[in-house]
Amino acid sequence: MIKNKFLMLLLSLLCLQYAKAQQVQISKSELVALTPLWKGDRFPDGRPKVPDDILRRMKSVSVEEAWAVMKNAGYAYQVAYDWQVINPDSVLVGRAVTATFMPGRPDVWGAIDSLGKKAGKRGQNTWAVDLLVKGDVYVADQFGASLNGPTIGDNVGNAIYAKTGNGIVYDGALRDVEGLKEIGNFTSFFTSYHPSFHNPPGDLTTMIVGINHPTRIRTVTVMPGDVVLGKLGVVVFVPPHLAERVVTTSEIVRLRDMFGHQRLREGKYTAGQIDARWSEEIEKDFSKWLNDHINDLPVGKEQIQEFLKDRTW
């Protein structure tokens, strides 16, 4: 009897481990292991939580500035191009929640859907949406699917916006684009438009295979917790451990450009002097200019003071 009970317990544990292995959502331990360079706060599921202040400052970062910092750090393929855009004059910034879809295969789709139903879930297209919180950006690899591919229309779009206050990055076709545009601040990047739906009866065209796993958007490997920066028709994915470096570098470049342009207009320096490595005289002038205008510049006073603290000029 004891032996039988032990075997039943062992069988139950094995079944539990098998079920966990089949779960679509990544485990906390796996996610932490895949993002070891992030030393800051995390969400309960292990996703890196870049501070809100960094997200706020990221909106002013140019694509070129972000690209240069990341390339110098060894991350040369973090920019995705060729998007259709909702609200093209706005900027999208937030923390990535990733979803990966694949072409539907009945046996695999059924296995995934069965596990979801046991957990009380319905509609695979909303599983990742249910996890979103304020400041997130839903980032989905929909493998560019068009006919019978869309997993987001105006209903799901409104749900995403209500949870995040943000739009989406979606490598596939959207439906109900007119309705999505009516949301207002739903700044979004998507591949195409199609009026069909992802799962008409008898046609299993898409299935979700990963939530908060590494995913691919165009030629970029995107990790959950990456900072999304979408502007001017392109999307940049900033690794969380580089986010503060990106915004700080951008702010310094912005201030130096403002100073240099002003001094050029005044005729104090030549273009050759400003365009080359600055002399000690110009650096001293720049430090004084920062102090004199510290309350009027488009960079926070605290950030400028931190920058000046380390300068020797």
Image (spheres, rainbow, N blue to C red):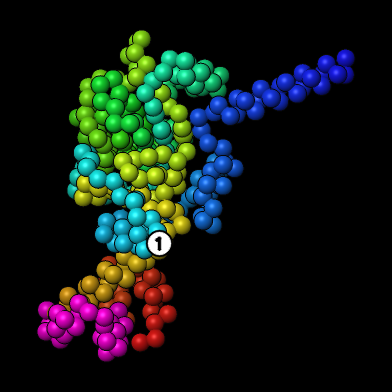
Q: Main secondary structure of the magenta part?
A: helix
Q: Where is residue 30 in the image (x, y as percent from the top left)?
A: 56, 42
Up/down of 111 relative to 224, above or below:
above
- Residue drawn 32% across the image and 71% down it: 252
Q: Among all residues in the image, which is located at the extreme top?
A: 202
The answer to whether residue 225 is left or right of residue 88 is: right
Give SS at disc 1. loop
Up/down of 190 relative to 105, above or below:
below
Up/down of 189 relative to 177, above or below:
below
Up/down of 198 relative to 165, above or below:
above
Residue ID for mark 1: 73
Q: Can residue 56 be seen in this view?
A: no
**Residue 103 versus residue 154: which sits nearer the camera?**
103
Q: Quadrant of the C terminus?
A: bottom left
What amino acid is at disc 1? Ala
The answer to whether residue 29 is left or right of residue 225 is: right
The answer to whether residue 122 is left or right of residue 190 is: right
Q: Is residue 228 visible?
A: yes
Q: Where is residue 140 in the image (x, y as percent from the top left)?
A: 36, 35
The answer to whether residue 20 is magenta is no
Q: Give the range drawn in magenta.
A: 265-290
